[in-house]
Image: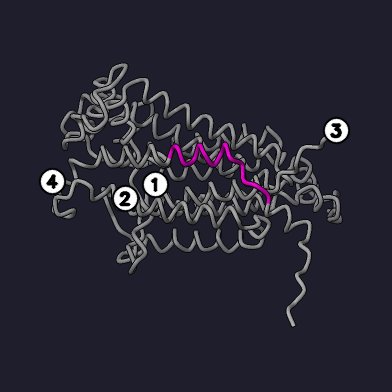
Amino acid sequence: MAKAKRDLTLEEQWAKGPIDLPFFTLTLLLLGFGLIMVFSASSATAFYEELSKHDPTYYAKRQFLFAVAGVFIMYLTSRLNYQQLRWMSVFILGFSILLLVLVLIPGIGVERNNARRWIRSIGPIPQFQPSEIAKVGVVLYFSARLSKRDSEMKLKRPKKWDTRTFYGRLMVFLKRIGFLELVPYGAILLLIVVLMKFEPHMSGTILILVAGAAVLFASGIRLGWFVGGGSLMVAGLTLIITTTDYMTKRIDLWRDPWSYPKDGGYQTIQSLYAIGSGGLLGLGLGRSRQKFLYLPEEHNDFVFAIVCEELGYIGAAIVLLLFALLILRGYWIALHARDRFGALLVVGITTLLAFQVFLNIGVVTNLFPVTGISLPFFSYGGTALMIQLMEMGIILSVSRQIPAPKQD
């Protein structure tokens, strides 16, 4: 006898709603644009390399396969009820911290340019940066915990300290200003910062701090803590920069790359040449000169310089406009999310995307010192692309449960 088909619960009905079509379309447009630019930017390097067997489409084909896998992951994630991410968040965060420890172990971590940021490829799993998973882990865990902030504060019985002692008065004061509430979040961020200091990975550290701060801010933490925390972060980064030869050299190169034309300043100089050569309309798609082994990382961190050279100011402006529309739509979804958890998730992921775009373009134009920061959807890198598309899938999952507007 056939089983009777059970009725869907209200939560299941909401999880099966339509995705946000504008956000989905913008994501696919940027992905398609990025695949074209990876093909154009990488063709010369792939042709000259032994690794690619002189196949100019080597990197483009690999990126296309990762993009197909990423879109499939985005679709599956968008079909997932994002409420399930609440209990998964602590395991994802713990796993990401474990990976940050493992990357420091010789034989597991891969070192490039005096930095150990990559886990060695294992079988079908390609080489990847644990910091990419740590970004997601921080956003998920912070969103899950802070989404219950108001209800927990109402239900939790206030702890009483003996105000006749200095310790008791201090604890009462720290609780009143909200310090005690921030301790676990600060401890998590501090642990990640310390681990990434040993890689070192300054840009990744900044992105994780910004993502965590965005979720904390959206949850209602007092503004004063961000002023104090921002000042402390600037002071800490200044201390790291001034006491680390690796970072001090980066600052010197940023201030005057032409003083080191054949050393560390070479990449920045070639990037600026590429941007300046593009002019208003560009040299034409596929006609970049800098990609012929002049500009290092032309299909990775510096792909935007090739965009400017080939498509000019107009093409670069269109790319930035698409990113701006995607980011604005992300915040729109956050404002209309069904619950606080969904809103915090989208705010964290969208802010992470926005700041990564800002940092990458700032590096390419020498607004910031050169550091290893990729441009989402454009820079070559399989695991990073799949994780970015998974993040877009989380936002689409939240968009499925946006309550329908009331009809009169």
Task: Name the foreground residue: 197 vs 395.
Answer: 395
Residue of label 2: 115
Mark identifier at residue 201: 1
> If you read the primary sequence from the N terminus, does the residue marked by circle 3 or circle 4 appear first?
4
Marks 2 and 1, how far apart in space? 7 Å
Amino acid under disc 2: Ala
Residue for badge 4: 48
Q: Which residue was labeled with disc 3?
A: 408
Q: Nearer the viewer, mark 4 or mark 1?
A: 4
Q: Classify mark 1: helix, strand or loop.
A: loop
Q: Position of residue 215 (x, y in %)?
A: 63, 43
So how many labels did they put on this image? 4
Dividing the picture into quadrants, the one containing residue 309 is top left
Q: Is residue 335 above or below residue 150?
A: above
Q: Work out which residue is located at the far top of the displayed protein and give it.
A: 280
Tell me which residue sits at (38%, 54%) in the image: 66
Q: Is residue 343 magenta?
A: no
What residue range appears in magenta?
17-30
* Kind of residue indicated by mark 3: Asp
Q: How is the image coloured?
A: one colour
Element type at marker 4?
A: helix
To which quarter of the image does residue 408 belong? top right
Label whose residue precedes the other's in the sequence (3 or 2): 2
Residue under the image location 35 percent in, 39 percent down: 371
Magenta region, mostly helix, strand or loop? helix
